[in-house]
Image (tube, rainbow, N blue to C red):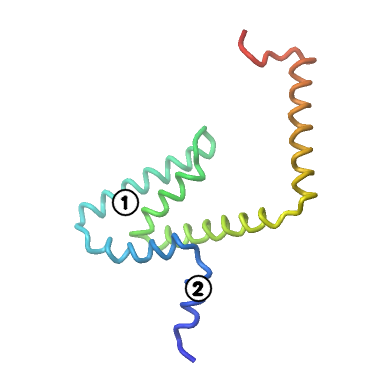
Amino acid sequence: MTTDAPEEQRTRSEPKMVTRLRAQREQHRDRSRIVRILFVLVGFTLLLAGIAMLVAPGPAFVVIPIGLAILSLEFTWAETALEKSLEQADRAARKASETTTTERVLVGVATALACAALAAWAYWGDIPVLPV
């Protein structure tokens, strides 16, 4: 039995993006200090912008992983956070694909009822939907 078995198992179970980032991390270490500092500045800027987008309008769930991916080239805490978030995203995607037809129909009906309730509230509550 070899000692590479846990490594192979970990590589197979982790998202492809994590595997690619680990390979790029080695190349990144050969870059000049100025370039590495610029990567850190861009990474933190994107991460902070993504965190701000959690309360402000914007694609926070796209920007935060990009910032973490850039920071993971320099920091292991960012790599760990990125791995955890990508694993959660994979689990959520698997769970969503395993839903039954009944669950999908119920979600569709609930969404339609919520839209109808909002439309009725806007109509009978005399809430202006369009600024006219």
Task: Give coordinates of residue 31: x percent, y percent.
Answer: 22, 59
Looking at the rendered structure, the secondary structure element under dot 2 is helix
Residue with the mark numbered 2: 10
Which amino acid, mark 1? Val
Task: Give coordinates of residue 14: x percent, y percent.
Answer: 50, 66
User: Residue drawn at (26%, 48%), measured in percent from left and top?
Assistant: 38
- Residue sitting at the far bottom: 1
Of residues 107 and 50, the one nearer the viewer is 107
Residue with the mark numbered 1: 40
Closer to the eye: label 2 or 1: 2
Which amino acid, mark 2? Arg
Q: In this rendering, would 44 be left or right of 97?
A: left
Q: Residues within 10 Å of mark 1 (few under 14, many from 20)?
A: some
Measure the C-alpha gap from mark 2 to mark 1. 27 Å
User: Residue drawn at (31%, 47%), measured in percent from left and top?
Assistant: 41
Among the two numbered marks 2 and 1 on one chain, the one whose residue lies closer to the N terminus: 2
